[in-house]
Image: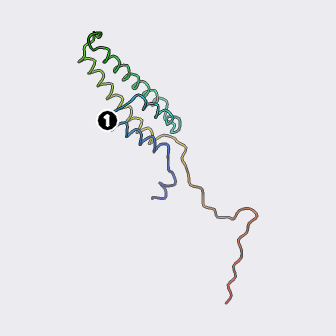
Amino acid sequence: MAESRRARFRPYATSFGILLIWLLVAKVYSPQYALWLLPFFALVEIPWPGFVAFAVSDAAVWVAVSAFFLSFPPTGRGNLSTMAWILEALVYVRYAVLLLLLWMSRRAGENVLELPPPVSEPSAGLHPARVEFSS
C-alpha cells in the first residue's frame, strides 16, 4: 500500500495544499500571499473557475478593506458597522474559496512524478558475467 502511494507522489499539489492550509490558519493574511499562490495554479493545473473564484474573492476583500478604512472620520462618510460586516463576510468567502482550492488540488490532473520502472534487462552492449560454481 505504501509503495503505491510513493509511486504517485505529487510535489506541486502537496506544496500547494500546505500553503493553502497555512493561509487558512495564519493569523495574518497579506495581499502578497496571493502572489505565492499564482505559480501553483499552472503547476497543479487547477481548473480556471478555481482561479477566477480566488482572484475575484481576493480583489473583493482588497476593495472592502480599502472602503472600510476610507469610511473612517473625518473624511469618510460610510457606515462603519455596515462596512465591517461586509468586510467580514468577504473574508469568510475568501476562506471558503481557499478550502475549495484545497479540494481542487487533491483532484487536479497534475503531472505525477512516477518512479522509474525497475531495470530488468542490462544496458545495451553490456552483458552480465556468467558465474560458474565448482563442485
Q: Quadrant of residue 120?
A: bottom right
In this rendering, the count of numbered labels is: 1
Q: Quadrant of residue 92?
A: top left
Left or right: 85 as drawn, with respect to 18: left
Identity of the residue furthest to the left in this view: 81
What x and y, as percent, mark residue 107? 46, 41
Q: Is residue 122 above or below residue 31?
A: below
Label 1 belongs to which residue?
A: 27
Q: Quadrant of residue 1?
A: bottom left
* Residue name at image x 51 percent, y 41 percent: 109
What x and y, as percent, mark residue 105? 45, 40
* Residue name at image x 32 percent, y 14 percent: 70
- Kindly identify the amino acid type of the residue bearing the numbered disc 1: Lys
What x and y, as percent, mark residue 48? 49, 30
Q: Nearer the viewer, residue 64 or 41?
A: 64
Left or right: 103 as drawn, with respect to 117: left
| Image quarter hosting the C terminus | bottom right
Q: Is residue 33 above or below residue 11?
A: above
* Residue name at image x 54 percent, y 47 percent: 112
What x and y, as percent, mark residue 102? 41, 38
Left or right: 53 as drawn, with respect to 26: right
* Residue name at image x 70 percent, y 82 percent: 132
Q: Nearer the viewer, residue 46 or 66?
A: 66
